[in-house]
């Protein structure tokens, strides 16, 4: 059954986030040969329409307004509701990002629709869209369908591969004029935590440190390795609680959930709450002094040793191959 599916493209610092292209790929499956409509919301986002089309959107609608310069649930939901009204889609796909997790349930609830969050896989079976999502902190997966009405889904970054970029693809780019009512929340200023390099939630390689790094300086060898592998640095809550790094790096049940291609855990014991955020990584390497550490139970490769010896050795070897 051909469906019209809307995909929200997420813009950060003037560029589309990679998860937007993954969302387009998911929407392509869901559309079953119907139409994938990209949506861009902001104050000057129309220049990015072509890129969404190159990644598989059939056409793109933009809603631009000064009041939409910064994300607010109030402003974005007004824009999105207007698009749903104009387009009458069968489904909407978002990234399972801070923005998607905030906006999708808000609009789904307003429209009295079903939402499937944190989707890691999607297929069509018996005419239904069947979504796969992790449960019990990633220990099991469930398959879900929405039986009636509009379907909302947020997809976990790094799980559904984007389509190959095709710069010869063309499609209509139009704008929709929406009268954005006065916002209840007005963002005056955004103060960013200084974060270097690759975005943790979309990184293909993550080097994570735990209490075993012992100090803020102890993260330096991990940062070096991350630089050589073009990866991001993450942390356990143990390391954040000890003030070795910022909480924005925390991975786990109460931190970020990540699924990189390669996760290197350094001096992390492997508490269940940490595993909840990283155990679905494609390849896990654990470096720990304690051969009984729980992290080795989920690791594909384990190195029993002192991280301050092992990590610089790995950096050196990777540098020889990659730099
Ligand atoms: P530790 O458990 O102290 O482990 C340190 C490890 O480093 C040890 O295994 C040790 O052998 C090893 N080590 C020490 N020195 C070296 C060295 N030189 N070289 C190699 N290895 C070395 N935790 C999270 O991570 N994320 C969460 O989101 C999270 N949410 C939580 C939510 C709740 C409600 C609760 C109760 C807890 C949560 N926790 C979370 C905390 C979690 O239970 C653990 O306390 C925490 O993950 C431990 O961090 P750690 O592994 O860095 O420290």
Image: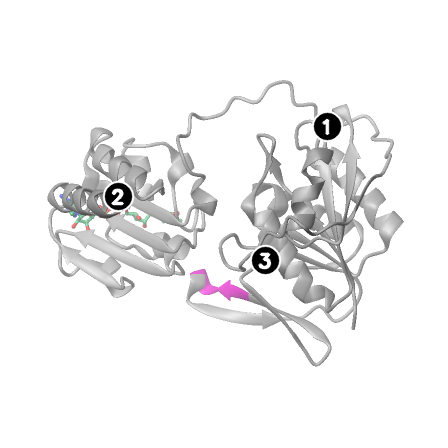
Ligand 1 within 8 Å, label 2 CB: yes
Is ligand 1 closer than 8 angstroms to the Cβ of mark 3?
no
Q: Which residue is disc 1 drawn over? A: 43
- Tell me which secondary structure the magenta stretch mostly adopts: strand
- Give the CA distance from mark 2 to mark 3: 36 Å
Residue picked out by circle 2: 210
Q: Secondary structure at mark 3?
A: loop
Q: Is residue 105 left or right of residue 226?
A: right
Whole-number angstrom distance, CA of label 3 to CA of label 1? 27 Å
Q: Secondary structure at mark 1?
A: loop
Quick one: label 2 or label 1, which is nearer the N terminus? 1
- Residue positioned most to the bottom: 126
Q: Nearer the viewer, mark 2 or mark 1?
A: 1
3D distance between C-alphas at marks 2 and 1: 40 Å
Q: Is residue 104 visible?
A: no
Q: Quickly name the residue at label 3.
A: 163
Q: Residue at x 73, y 35 (%)?
A: 46
Q: Is residue 92 left or right of residue 143?
A: right
Badge 2 density bin: few <14, some 14–19, many ≥20, Cα 10 Å: many
* Mark closest to the chain's N terminus, 3 or 1: 1
Q: Earlier in the sequence, mark 2 or mark 3?
A: 3
Disc 3 residue crowd, few under 14, some 14–19, many 20+, Cα 10 Å: some
Residue 52 seen by the camera:
yes
- Residue 189, relative to residue 249: is it above or below? above
- The magenta stretch is 133-137
């Amino acid at each position: 059954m051909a469906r019209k599916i809307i995909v929200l493209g997420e813009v950060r610092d003037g560029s589309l986030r990679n998860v937007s292209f993954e969302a387009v790929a998911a929407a392509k499956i869901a559309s079953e040969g119907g139409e994938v409509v990209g949506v861009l919301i902001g104050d000057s986002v129309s220049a990015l329409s072509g890129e969404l089309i190159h990644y598989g959107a059939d056409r793109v609608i933009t809603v631009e307004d000064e009041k939409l310069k910064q994300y607010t649930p109030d402003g974005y939901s007004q824009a999105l509701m207007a698009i749903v009204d104009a387009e009458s889609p069968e489904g909407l796909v978002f990234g399972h990002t801070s923005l998607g997790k905030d906006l999708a349930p808000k609009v789904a609830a307003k429209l009295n629709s079903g939402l499937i969050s944190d989707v890691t896989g999607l297929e069509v079976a018996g005419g239904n869209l069947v979504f796969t999502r992790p449960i019990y902190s990633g220990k099991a997966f469930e398959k879900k369908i929405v039986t009636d009405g509009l379907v909302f889904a947020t997809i976990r970054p790094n799980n559904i591969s984007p389509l190959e970029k095709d710069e010869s693809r063309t499609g209509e780019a139009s704008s929709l004029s929406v009268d954005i009512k006065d916002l209840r929340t007005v963002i005056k200023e955004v103060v960013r935590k200084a974060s270097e390099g690759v975005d943790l939630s979309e990184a293909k390689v993550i080097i994570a440190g735990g209490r075993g790094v012992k100090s803020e300086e102890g993260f330096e060898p991990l940062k070096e390795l991350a630089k050589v592998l073009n990866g991001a640095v993450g942390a356990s809550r143990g390391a954040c609680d000890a003030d070795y790094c910022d909480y924005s790096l925390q991975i786990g049940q109460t931190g970020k959930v990540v699924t990189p291609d390669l996760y290197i855990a350094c001096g992390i014991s492997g508490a269940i709450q940490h595993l909840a955020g990283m155990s679905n990584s494609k390849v896990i390497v654990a470096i720990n002094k304690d051969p009984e550490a729980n992290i080795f139970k989920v690791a594909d490769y384990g190195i029993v040793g002192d991280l301050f010896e092992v990590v610089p050795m790995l950096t050196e070897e990777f540098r020889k191959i990659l730099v």
